[in-house]
Image: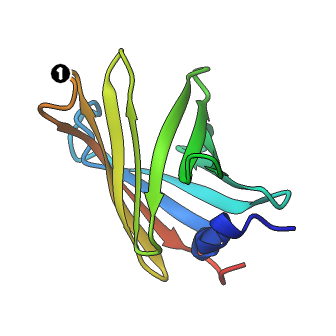
Amino acid sequence: MRNQFLEAFGVLVGDWQMTLSDAWFLDPPDTVVEGSATVEWLTDGFIMVRCVLGGESAYDLVIGHSDAQQSYVALYHDDRGVNRLFHMTFDGTTWNLSREDPDFHQRFLSEVRDDAIIGRWEASEDGGATWRKDYDLTFRRTGAQR
């Protein structure tokens, strides 16, 4: 039986073109990195997001739901070997991920549309008192919703 709490994520399922832009760490500052993402069900209990940027594997997210805590979580892994746990909110039009770890705080803030996800990653090195934008991340649907 499919996880009823993840049914709302069905709007994300499908294939997407990704664009990373306005990144403080890329030189020159107007550098744009193209990529793709696939969002699909992983068994009936999770949503898997696989992202490729610049032709190389970039990162994966496995999205789940904690029944006991009534909250969404995402496990993150990237090609550098970094693993992180994000807490999530999703209401069908706003998708946000956040983590508050000792190394730094990080969040993804986005607006979900039928054919696009418009978002940005931000980081804070002072416990969330101030935030800087890391980069913009835009997803454009490339095919029909699955």
Question: How did the renderer colour the structure?
Answer: rainbow
Q: Quadrant of the N terminus?
A: bottom right
Q: Nearer the viewer, residue 16 or 35?
A: 16
Q: Residue furthest left?
A: 130
- Residue under the point 61% across and 20% down: 81
Query: Residue at the spot x=29%, y=34% of the render?
Result: 26
44 up-or-down from 141: above or below:
above
Q: Secondary structure at mark 1?
A: loop
Q: Position of residue 118 (x, y in %)?
A: 35, 65
Q: Quadrant of residue 11?
A: bottom right
Location of residue 141 in the rendering, given as x and y in whole percent from the top left corner: 54, 74
Residue 41: image location, x then y, percent = 76, 62
Q: Is residue 114 left or right of residue 24?
A: right
Q: Is residue 114 left or right of residue 107?
A: right
Image quadrant containing the C terminus: bottom right
Tag 1 residue: 126
- The location of residue 95, given as percent across then percent down, is 42, 61
Image quadrant where residue 27 sits: top left
Q: Nearer the viewer, residue 1 or 118?
A: 1
x 44%, y 70%: residue = 91
> Farthest front residue?
68
Does the rendering let one see residue 126?
A: yes
Between residue 53 and residue 130, name the one nearer to us.
Answer: 130
Is 99 on the left-hand or right-hand side of 61?
left
Total tally of numbered discs in the picture = 1
At 56% across and 46% down in the image, what residue appears? 69
| Viewer can see residue 13 | no
Residue type, mark 1 in image: Asp
